Image (cartoon, helix red, strand yellow):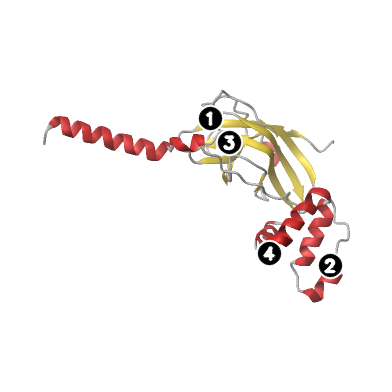
Amino acid sequence: MDPRRLVLSAVVLVTVVLVLVTRPWTFFINDEVDEAFPVLSGAERDSLRDMPEDQRDALLTMIEDARAMAADTARAMMKPDSEMQDDMPGGAPDPHPLLSGTWIEIDPVHRAEGSATIWLAGEERVLRFEDFRVTNGPQLHVLLTKNVPTSIFAGVGESGDYVDLGPLKGNVGNQNYDIPAELDLSEYKSAVIYCVPFHVVFSSAELLDASGG
C-alpha cells in the first residue's frame, strides 16, 4: 500500500475518533431542562411526570407559590378518587436549605452561573440548581467533592473523595439530583460540573451553611 495513503488513512481515523470523543458541536448546543422544586419524593416525582400535562402544569405553578400545599395536593391527585378527599393539603413541613453556593467562572470557556443548593425535602436530600447555565461539553457529570477545585485541571481527588450524582441533565435550567441517604454531607465541600473523559472541571460551587444555624 502507498505509504502516503496509509498515513492519510491513519490521520483520518484519528480525526474521526477525536471528533466522536470530544463531540465539539456540544459546545454550541444548549440542552435545556426545567424541573419542579423537589418537595416530592423520587417516586412521587416519577408519578408527576406521568400525569396529564394540564394537571402537571397546574402543580408546577402551585409549587412556585405554595410548595408544601402543592406537595400534599399532588399526593392526593395521585391516589384514587375515593381517597382524595381525606388527603387534601394539611400543612406538610416546608423543605429547607442545608448548604448552598454559587457557580464560578474558571476561564472564559469553562464557566457556570446560578446557584447550587442542598435541600432537605421530607426524608430526602436533593441537590438543586436554579438559574443555572454552564458551557456545554461531552459527558458532563455532577459531583460532590471533598475539595473545592478552582482550575480546570485541579482534579477531584482519588476515588472516595467524591461522589458522582450522575450525568448533567441539561446545561441550562433548573434541575434536581438525589443525594444518597448514607452520604455524610459534612465531608463534602463543593458541587462540581466535571467532564469525565478529559478529567476537566467546568465549574464548581463551594457549599456553605445555608440553614441559618
Counting from the top left corner in percent of width and height, residue 151 is at 56, 24
Instruction: Name the residue beneath numbered marker 1.
Output: 155
Crowd around label 2: few <14 · some 14–19 · many ≥20 (10 Å): some
**136 or 211: nearer the eye?**
136
Circle 4 Cα neighbour tier, 10 Å, few/some/many (<14 / 14–19 / ≥20): few
Return the residue nearer the eye: 168 or 32: 32
Query: Which numbered disc flags the more N-terminal residue, 3 or 1?
Result: 1
> Residue beneath label 4, please?
52
Quarter of the image with the N terminus is top left
Label 1 Cα neighbours within 10 Å, binned few <14 / some 14-19 / many ≥20: some
Amino acid identity at mark 1: Gly
Please tell me whether mark 1 or mark 2 is closer to you in this view.
2
Q: Earlier in the sequence, mark 1 or mark 2?
A: 2
Res 40 seen here: no
> Residue 174 at x, y = what percent?
67, 43
- Compared to 13, does 123 lie above or below? below
At mark 1, the secondary structure is loop
| Residue 16 image point, x, y percent | 33, 38
Q: Secondary structure at mark 4?
A: loop
Residue 135 tag number: none
Give the residue number, with chain letter if any, for mark 2.
87
Per the image, the residue denoted by label 3 is 193
Image quadrant in which you'd find residue 213: top right
* Structural distance between the alpha carbons of marks 2 and 4: 20 Å
